[in-house]
Image (cartoon, grey):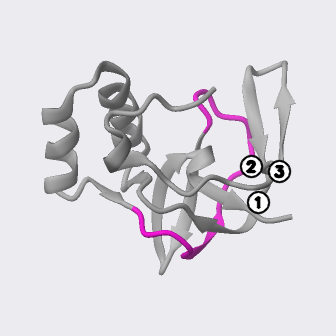
Amino acid sequence: MPVPLLAAAVLSGALCAYTPAYSDDKASGGILVSEGIVKTKSGQVACKKRKWMEDMLTFIRTKNKARYRDYIETRKCLIMRGGKEVKVLESKPVIGVIVSFEYEHEVLWTYWSSLAYER
């Protein structure tokens, strides 16, 4: 399930040349994401709280540019730089496939495809 884009210039990240490590979990309706070291994709959104990431996905889907910009300006969320190594913290299925990760001792939340999973 791809994330709808608010604006290609704002959210376009490097495309992954390989398939991320995940498997369908039919029982819970989620996707199981592998734990481990992964890299961020340039231009993708991450937030300091899961709720804020859920809000951002809603803003993207509904094209609410003002609210999207507000979350970035108030530093609730940020636009990631690509190629930064992060550690995925959870691998359990989650509705909407939002995952948490750690970067420099800070926990952030993002959409699972915003991270490049290495084989």
Task: Give the x, y percent position of residue 1.
Answer: 63, 26
Sequence-first disc among 2 and 1: 1
Task: Give the x, y percent position of residue 35.
Answer: 76, 60
Query: Residue at the spot x=47%, y=62% of the render?
Result: 42
Task: Give the x, y percent position of residue 11.
Answer: 39, 47
Does dot 3 land on a helix, a strand or a loop? Answer: loop
The Cα–Cα distance between marks 2 and 3, rounded to whole angstroms, is 10 Å
Quadrant position of the C terminus in the picture: bottom right
User: Which stretch did the figure color magenta?
Assistant: 80-97
The Cα–Cα distance between marks 2 and 1, rounded to whole angstroms, is 6 Å
Task: Name the residue type under label 3.
Answer: Ala
User: Between 117 and 54, which is closer to the camera in this rendering?
Assistant: 117
Instruction: Please say if 94 is above or below 111.
Output: above
Sequence-first disc among 2 and 3: 3
Magenta stretch contains residue 38? no
Residue labelled with disc 3: 21
117 left or right of 54 in image: right
Residue labelled with disc 1: 35
Query: Residue at the spot x=61%, y=57% of the render?
Result: 115
Residue labelled with disc 2: 91
